[in-house]
Amino acid sequence: MTIFALGINHKTAPVSLREQVAFAPEQILDALRDLTTTTQVSDAVILSTCNRTELYFSGSPEQSKQVIDWLSKFHQLDLAELQHHLYLHQDQQASSHLMRVACGLDSLVLGEPQILGQVKQAYSHSRQAGTINPAFERLFQKTFSVAKQVRTETDIGASAVSVAFAAVSLARQIFGQLGKVKVLLIGAGETIELVAKHLLEQGAEKITVANRSYDKAAALASQFNGEAVSLAQVPQSLVNADVVISSTASTLPIVGKGMVEQALKKRRHKPMFFVDLAVPRDIEEQVAELEDAYLYTVDDLQSIVLQNLQNRQEAAAEAEQMIQQGVNEFSQWLSLHGQLDVVRDYRDKGEAIRDELLAKAGKQIASGQDPEKVLAELATKLSNRLMHAPTKALRQLLQDEQPQQQSLINTLLDL
């Protein structure tokens, strides 16, 4: 059995192609069954995320070509164009790739944790579709075990590697728990949406979203039971804000020094934490001159991100060692599993010969032949049939006159 990992990801293809190769959740089960029926591969798992679509399967090199053809036909894509962006790993490289993916080492953001849950979901779909066998069961369980080890024994996911996460992490360092902290988000684009998600994960409950388009602010705020205001209401909203994080496309500052100064007076100089993620800046740099205002820009956070990324890269090196050990352990198991198949086949063949000769002897006795002669003939034929192939092989081995082989033969034959 050869294990294959076939895929396309953010490194090999643009999003315009990745979105065409992606499988919708409701397609997965039917796709798995169609894949195994069409190509006759013995195992199949489909992992499909925004950054990658990967098919893990076992079969022959010829079947791997059939799987590529199936993928192009399923999504109605040009085969030559698709092949240009595909990668194909097999056996240990395939196992290693799966483990690296599950550990977040092959992600767009190094060490991101969501991918492990997505791999587990892909495995669950495969079990539900009935397209996974014992060897793949073992492979995925080993993968989950390695991913857990990497998460618990390295710092692969401990440090912020996006400015959005860094902003929230910094706020948490300053305020501790964020449950009672009042947050004002200025903007409603992707960055602010990501900030909002990180805030929720860190326990923030009191969030206000301000945006030039009130409808967009309201749409984002509704996702976490927050409040929406217009940009014109920012001066009033500042009074209640402990944390202000801004990211808009404005060409002029939205929050000025005077505005913050007025808010601090009304707050009786209760400290305020500002993070400006916009370029050009949304918050006047003079705000940092105020005694109770603490302003961080995207450049400040970028230095934190770069240091944290270096920390993650060091953790990734540790993770690679754990992955290699996991691959070796699975390969050893797979090799032993194959050897057990040989033992099983040998025993099955011996039992088949026994049953064949026993049935023939039973007919002879039933027809009136002498039972003693029939049993003697049965014993002779059974011995000859069972010993013929091993004896032939032994003679060939003994011609080499190697002491190691002689010792092995003695052990196998209990001599």
Image (cartoon, rainbow, N blue to C red):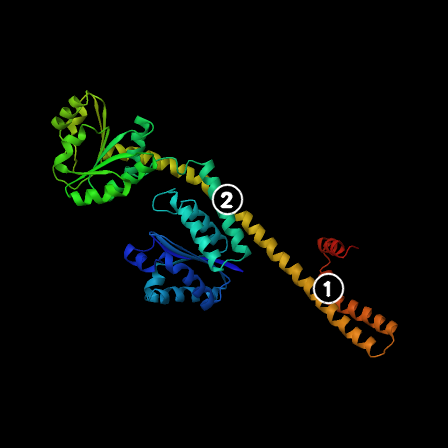
Q: Is residue 366 left or right of residue 1?
A: right
**Image position, residue 191 (x, y; %):** 25, 41
Q: Quadrant of residue 286?
A: top left
398, 183: nearer the viewer: 183
Farthest-out residue, bottom: 367
Q: Is residue 179 above or below residue 320?
A: above
Secondary structure beneath dot 1 equals helix
Quarter of the picture containing the N terminus is bottom right
Q: Is residue 401 above or below residue 189?
A: below
Residue 339's tag is none
**Image position, residue 54 (x, y; %):** 40, 56
Q: Amino acid at mark 1?
A: Pro
Tags 1 and 2 touching, CB below 8 Å: no
**Image position, residue 385 (x, y; %):** 75, 69
**Image position, residue 410 (x, y; %):** 76, 55
At x 34%, y 61%, the residue is 84
37, 251: nearer the viewer: 37
Residue 145's tag is 2
Quarter of the picture containing the C terminus is bottom right
Q: Amino acid at mark 2?
A: Ser
Q: Is residue 24 above or below residue 34?
A: above
At x 34%, y 29%, the residue is 177
At x 51%, y 55%, the residue is 136
Q: Is residue 323 left or right of residue 370?
A: left
Residue 390's tag is 1
Secondary structure beneath dot 2 equals helix
